[in-house]
């Protein structure tokens, strides 16, 4: 039996600002992890990644990151992805700063 | 200090213009990321975890006040009001946006600075002893040679596509403060039997995945032979170095696989071949550069005010004891300004602090500043009578921390708070260790101790040569910290020994605390440093302190 597929989100950095972004189900790029499309099927994930990588004038370095469903939408699984949703831990900069504004 | 020639100026300006065009073409979509990436990296622009990062070279760690003010201006105008000084004597800006980078590079060019060759498989920023030109134990200021190497290596057509990046470090003192034995080429100035200055040439050192201490390929190289000799080393490496495997591409592996004797023979053979081609122009150029590094005109004044202050004020005394080093002029001192205030990010300075340091360098320091690989700022020439006033001024901007060389003077790489390659965080670990030992009021009692932290196997935080090294790893999706002990980055360089299994994020500070208590118990007297104790007693008592459960089991 094959192992169950760990759901994914498509993430990248925005070309102009470098900020972390996520691909949504309606083909937008969101700055918020919980707005991302949670992809539960491997073949679909590959399609979405191709779609993302093709947007060369908007995004850099698109990849699939493990995620899980949460009450407000997808949540990161790995700590690296969790840091990417917030920003650094030594200063209140990055997404945590913009979220507070 | 060296000032740009017309050639340097035109070269850097042309590079800025070129890169501005490239950024424009990337933004309008005519360049793809695959096309743009190598171009941006050639100009020091990385894409990190949360944003772009611009790495600016500070050649041999030397800055003048005007440059320091410009770095502050850049931080305020295009970044978040601070900069991060690195173990490579560079400064990194963590938050530039793509369209602003040309303007930043142009502002750098205004003060004769650039970000060229801070990335890529070329000769990187040449690093030097941060006490260069001032240290009491120095034979000669190594910076003219470093500048010669910078000019020679910049855009050198033969060495733009080396198998891998290439780092050169140089020191003019036999006491190595530049970690020369852990560089691709280390140059350590020594004297021969006739008393003439020359270099010990060390090749194939490096940290990272496979840490190695470099091998001496020439015990004494006359100064005049330096450039052709370095070129010979590069040339042999360029031919032999492996391009098939990134992890085996550094010269340390080439030396390891070829053997020291054979590589030495090849270098000497190549050197003999190219030496005649160096007709003396390099020496003329070096002489011109040396003139630009003439020492300042030292003043003569009484120093009794310093002595009186030293005996009267304990806060000043504590700072003087840790943050001053011996200058070759007895009336002067070398001041290390700690960028390691307890709980702050190692190596970070705010724009206000940068401006204050620039002002103080002008007022008290013959307008010279240095950045150390230990992520501090140095005022190399301060007359002793000015020290009390300098200390008071530093205290006003949070820069008077008296901890240089102590447990809280930690080297930490950016780790997973910024770096895209990281496997764990390093900055908060450094912050927590510093805060903990400040709280325990133990650090002065513990004495000289170097903790160095890297957030991944690449070892930018030099953890292998820390007396205590900490390496952050990702173990099954959790941050995990491995400890190495007994490392040394000086002329007696040693790679530290792994102590055992790693510790979770919440366990690492208590683990360090246990280590320190073990040291305090083991040392014969307060003058015996951590490293000396470790060398005397070995790993066992420290291991027992780190893993008390195992130790108890073994005893049972
Ligand atoms: S050691 Fe690793 S985590 Fe730290 S700066 Fe270097 S590459 Fe990044």
Image (tube, rainbow, N blue to C red):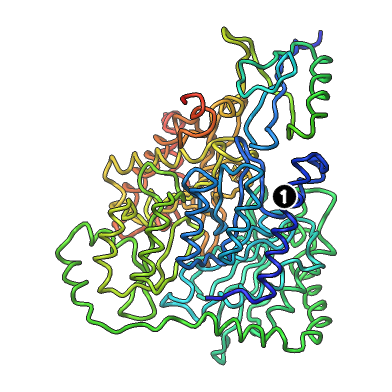
Task: Find numbered disc 1 in the image and state the secondary structure of the residue it sits on.
Answer: helix
Residue A23 picture location, percent across and down: 71, 21
Residue at the spot x=79%, y=60% of the render? B162
User: Considering only vertical position in the picture, is B243 above or below B272?
Assistant: above
User: Considering only vertical position in the picture, is B386 above or below B210?
Assistant: below
Q: Could you say which quadrant of the image residue B255 lies in?
A: bottom right
Residue B270 picture location, percent across and down: 82, 77
Q: How many marks?
A: 1
Q: Is residue B180 visible?
A: no
| Residue nearest the viewer, comparing B8 with A1 | B8
Horizontal side of residue B3 vs B258, given as left or right:
left
Q: Where on the image, by quarter, is ligand 1?
A: top right
How many residues crowd mark 1 within 10 Å: few (<14), some (14–19), many (20+)?
Answer: many
Q: Is residue B290 visible?
A: yes
**Residue that sits furthest to the bottom in the current view:** B194
| Residue nearest the viewer, comparing B107 with B82 | B107
| Residue nearest the viewer, comparing B555 with B306 | B306
| Residue nearest the viewer, comparing A98 with B380 | A98
**Residue that sits furthest to the left in the current view:** B312
Horizontal side of residue B237 vs B521, given as left or right:
right
Q: Quadrant of the C terminus of chain B?
A: top left
Q: Is mark 1 within 8 Å of ligand 1?
A: no
User: Which residue is the site of mark 1?
Assistant: B40
């Amino acid at each position: 039996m094959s192992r169950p597929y760990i759901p994914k989100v498509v993430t990248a950095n925005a070309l102009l600002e470098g900020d972390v972004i996520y691909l949504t189900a309606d083909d937008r790029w969101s700055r918020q992890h919980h707005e991302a499309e949670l992809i539960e099927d491997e073949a679909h994930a590959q399609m979405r990644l191709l779609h993302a990588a093709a947007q060369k004038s908007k995004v850099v370095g698109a990849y699939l990151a493990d995620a899980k469903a949460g009450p407000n939408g997808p949540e990161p699984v790995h700590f690296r992805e969790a840091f990417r949703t917030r920003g650094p831990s030594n200063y209140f900069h990055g997404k945590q700063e913009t979220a507070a504004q | 200090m060296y000032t740009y020639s017309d050639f340097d100026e035109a070269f850097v300006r042309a590079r800025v213009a070129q890169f501005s065009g490239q950024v424009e073409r990337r933004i309008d979509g005519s360049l793809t990321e695959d096309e743009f990436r190598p171009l941006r990296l050639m100009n020091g622009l990385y894409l990190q975890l949360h944003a772009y990062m611009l790495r600016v070279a500070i050649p041999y760690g030397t800055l003048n006040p005007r440059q320091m003010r410009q770095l502050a201006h850049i931080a305020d105008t295009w970044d978040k009001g601070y900069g991060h000084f690195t173990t490579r004597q560079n400064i990194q800006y963590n938050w530039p946006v793509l369209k602003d980078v040309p303007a930043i590079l142009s502002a750098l060019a205004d003060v004769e600075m650039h970000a060229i060759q801070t990335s890529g498989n070329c000769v990187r920023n040449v690093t030097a002893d941060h006490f260069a030109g001032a240290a009491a134990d120095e034979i000669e200021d190594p910076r003219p040679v470093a500048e010669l190497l910078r000019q020679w290596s910049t855009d050198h057509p033969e060495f733009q596509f080396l198998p891998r990046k290439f780092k050169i470090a140089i020191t003019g003192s036999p006491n190595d403060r530049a970690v020369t034995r852990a560089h691709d080429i280390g140059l350590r100035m020594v004297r021969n039997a006739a008393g003439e200055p020359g270099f010990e040439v060390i090749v194939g050192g490096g940290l990272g995945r496979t840490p190695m201490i470099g091998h001496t390929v020439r015990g004494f190289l006359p100064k005049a032979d330096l450039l052709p000799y370095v070129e010979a080393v590069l040339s042999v490496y360029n031919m032999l170095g492996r391009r098939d495997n990134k992890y085996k591409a550094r010269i340390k592996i080439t030396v390891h696989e070829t053997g020291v004797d054979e590589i030495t023979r090849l270098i000497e053979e190549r050197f003999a071949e190219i030496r005649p081609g160096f007709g003396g122009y390099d020496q003329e150029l070096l002489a011109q550069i040396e003139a630009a590094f003439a020492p300042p005109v030292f003043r003569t004044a009484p120093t009794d005010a310093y002595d009186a202050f030293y005996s009267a004020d304990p806060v000043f005394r504590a700072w003087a004891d840790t943050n001053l080093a011996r200058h070759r002029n007895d009336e002067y001192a070398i001041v290390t300004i700690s960028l390691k205030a307890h709980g702050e990010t190692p190596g970070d300075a705010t724009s206000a602090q940068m401006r204050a340091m620039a002002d103080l360098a002008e007022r008290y320091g013959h307008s010279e500043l240095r950045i150390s690989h230990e992520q501090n700022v140095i005022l190399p020439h301060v007359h002793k009578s000015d020290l009390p006033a300098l200390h008071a001024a530093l205290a006003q901007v949070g820069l008077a921390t008296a901890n240089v060389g102590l447990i809280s003077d930690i080297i930490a790489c950016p780790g997973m708070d910024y770096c895209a390659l990281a496997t764990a965080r390093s900055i908060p670990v450094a912050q927590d260790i510093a805060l903990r030992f400040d709280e325990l009021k133990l650090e002065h009692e513990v004495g000289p101790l170097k903790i160095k932290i890297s957030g991944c196997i690449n070892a930018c935080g030099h953890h292998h040569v820390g007396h205590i090294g900490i390496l952050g790893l990702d173990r099954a999706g959790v941050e995990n910290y491995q400890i190495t002990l007994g490392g040394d980055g000086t002329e007696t360089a040693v790679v530290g020994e792994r102590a055992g299994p790693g510790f979770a994020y919440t366990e690492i500070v208590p683990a360090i605390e246990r280590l320190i208590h073990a040291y305090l118990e083991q040392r014969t007297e307060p003058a015996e440093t951590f490293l000396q104790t470790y060398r005397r007693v070995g790993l066992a008592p420290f291991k027992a302190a780190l893993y008390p459960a195992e130790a108890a089991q073994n005893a049972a």
